[in-house]
Amino acid sequence: MQISLKKIYSGKVRDLYEIDDKRMLMVATDRLSAFDVILDEPIPHKGEILTQISNFWFNKLADIMPNHFTGDSVFDVLPKEEAEAIQHRAVVCKRLTPVKIESIVRGYLTGSGLKDYKKTGTICGLALPEGLVEASKLPEPIFTPSSKAEVGDHDINISYEECEHQIGKALAKQVKEAALALYTKAAEYALTKGIIICDTKFEFGLDENGVLTLMDEVLTPDSSRFWAVKNYKEGTNPPSFDKQFVRDWLENSGWNKQAPAPKIPQEVIEKTVAKYQEALDLLTK
């Protein structure tokens, strides 16, 4: 679907269009990024499902901090035919100045965090208790920032001190406290729906008054690792609701994690769509 607004940015999975100097249109595509590489095969309906999940969380977490919603709908800024075509995958959002780090919160040990822990007993410089294994619940959620990569490059885990150096001590403290508060509330709610939020990544921006604002996407299967409570067992790698399903297939494919990625089998694509839909249904019903 062609959009009559001017495109100002095309990211790994989202496209941005200019509305005016205060607002832009964010459109979630069906593209999938894994290991910071955009895969050739789209995941059908992914953009619509993830937008619905994000919108649910933006509303649920609005008491913690402001978000990028403007209160406008796509029908306020687009011709009717265009709006109808993208209404479930597009959001009118505030223009914000992005905070230049990835704000990652981990509640459980897995992925790159597990690899760091096995080598050093720490994650991003944070010392953890001895004896933890795959999927161990951490004593408390931890904030483990990473540097933002350009499209095609890999994000790099950094220490909190490096985070302070990159964005300033006051803003780093604000971001850390906000990320931990958001994760804690979301994780507690998700547990009541049978979902463990293992870890997640938040994106923040500053508005024209310098107010820290939650933006982009929130607690979706693209930005998080979701496990089913019923399948959780410490010491294992629990099956996930999210794109980890694709990541696991890629990990086992022998791919070197450099573009281009191997062709994803149709069966893996279909199972990924089903997992996204299941996560939406569980969280919102």
Image (cartoon, helix red, strand yellow):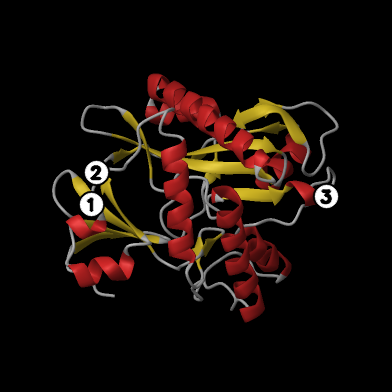
Which is more N-terminal, label 1 or label 3?
A: 1
Q: Please identify the quarter of the rendering in which residue 139 is found.
A: top right
Q: Is residue 115 left or right of residue 41?
A: right
For the point 63% across and 49% down, which residue is it?
A: 225
Would you say residue 8 is visible in this rendering? yes
- Mark 2 = which residue? 95
The residue tagged 3 is 236
C-alpha separation, residue under disc 1 versus residue under disc 2: 6 Å
Residue type, mark 3 in image: Thr
Question: What element does badge 3 sit on?
Answer: loop
| Disc on the earlier residue, 3 or 2 | 2
Q: Is the C-beta separation of discs 3 and 1 under 8 Å? A: no
1 relative position to 78: left or right: right
Residue neighbourhood size for the residue with mark 2, other residues' Cα within 10 Å, grouped as few (<14), some (14–19), many (≥20): many
* Vertical placement of residue 68 versus 151, above or below: above
Query: Looking at the image, which residue is at 54% across and 44% down?
Result: 156
Quadrant where the N terminus is found in the figure? bottom left
Q: Which residue is mark 1?
A: 24
Instruction: Judge whether 237 appears above or below 213 on screen.
Output: below
